[in-house]
Amino acid sequence: MDRIPILKMGPFLLVTIQVDLYDRLALNLENDLIAMVSKTGARGVLIDISAVNIVDSFMGRILGNIASMSRIMDAETVVVGMQPAVAITLVELGLTLQGVHTALNVEKGMDLLYDRTDLLTTQEDEDNGEAPDDYNE
Amino acid sequence: MDRIPILKMGPFLLVTIQVDLYDRLALNLENDLIAMVSKTGARGVLIDISAVNIVDSFMGRILGNIASMSRIMDAETVVVGMQPAVAITLVELGLTLQGVHTALNVEKGMDLLYDRTDLLTTQEDEDNGEAPDDYNE
């Protein structure tokens, strides 16, 4: 596999990282993401790393790069689903993920993006797992 | 990697398949998905296969299994993001993906799930890539 799929979800883009990022894959991801932000006018990028067991300085730099590039394109970046062990390692390594927001899971990350981009949240009624049913009242 | 992450998005679950499914990985995915459906009460399962270049009979059977299991748990399954070449191969192989719904991308798949599960869609205003901003009027 030489590309990580990028999913468009409403005004945001979602990327799930499931494999170790090597040089070319990371570079492709950066390029593809920026191209998608430009093409779709996305206001936010969600990066799910729940399947990632190790975040080293390379991965940290890639996440930082994506956040910086996205910000220039007027899109916020939120990293979601970080495993507790990864958070511990990050702090012990002294990596701060500069410019990257974090959230516990995709739903909370999406709420955070709606907040930060001043878009109206559509998640309020979905927190209990049910669909919103009062929007048309 | 021995697990594919499952993301909860409102009333639905989202799975992005980026790697070749071998026996144990497929089995884990089935188990994890059914456990998640049971735990979260999800009404639908979205499986994105945009990164999958080859769907063989094994993969077709796994998708069919997931759909059958989910249906018993009162959740619909939609496969999204199929590459044109994969669709061609499926037909040439005579694989019909019995019981599996398909949609072009995640957004359309989510719309389909909202339709099929009689939940109110929240995607109506997002088709043009903009956030809904008239729900509270």
Image (spheres, coloured by chain):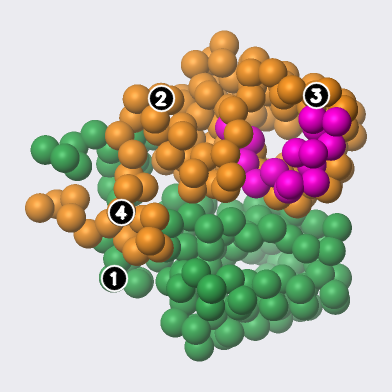
Chain colours: A orange, B green
Are discs 4 and 3 both within one chain?
yes
- Relative side of B60 to A90, left or right: left
Q: Is most of the magenta stretch helix, strand or loop?
A: helix
Tell me the amino acid under the disc marked 4.
Asp
At horizontal 26% and vertical 60% (from top left) the residue drawn is: B120
At horizontal 33% and vertical 39% (from top left) the residue drawn is: A121
Mark 3 lies on a secondary structure that is: loop
> Horizontal and vertical percent for residue A82?
70, 44
- The residue that mark 4 highlights is A125
- The residue that mark 3 highlights is A95
> Please, which chain is the residue tagged with disc 3 on?
A
Magenta residues, as a range?
A: A78-92
Check disc 3: other Cα within 10 Å, few if <14, some if 14-19, many if 20+: some
Q: Nearer the viewer, mark 2 or mark 1?
A: 2
Tell me the amino acid under the disc marked 1.
Asp
Q: Are marks 4 and 1 in contact (CB under 8 Å)?
A: no
Are discs 2 and 4 both within one chain?
yes
Q: Nearer the viewer, mark 4 or mark 1?
A: 4
Check disc 1: other Cα within 10 Å, few if <14, some if 14-19, many if 20+: few
User: Which residue is nearer to you in this view: B111 or A117?
Assistant: A117
Check disc 4: other Cα within 10 Å, few if <14, some if 14-19, many if 20+: some
At horizontal 10% and vertical 53% (from top left) the residue drawn is: A137
Q: Are marks 3 and 2 in contact (CB under 8 Å)?
A: no
> Please, which chain is the residue tagged with disc 1 on?
B
Q: Nearer the viewer, mark 2 or mark 4?
A: 4
Tell me the amino acid under the disc marked 3.
Leu
> Please, which chain is the residue tagged with disc 2 on?
A
- The residue that mark 2 highlights is A117
Which of the two discs, 3 and 2, labels the residue nearer the N terminus?
3
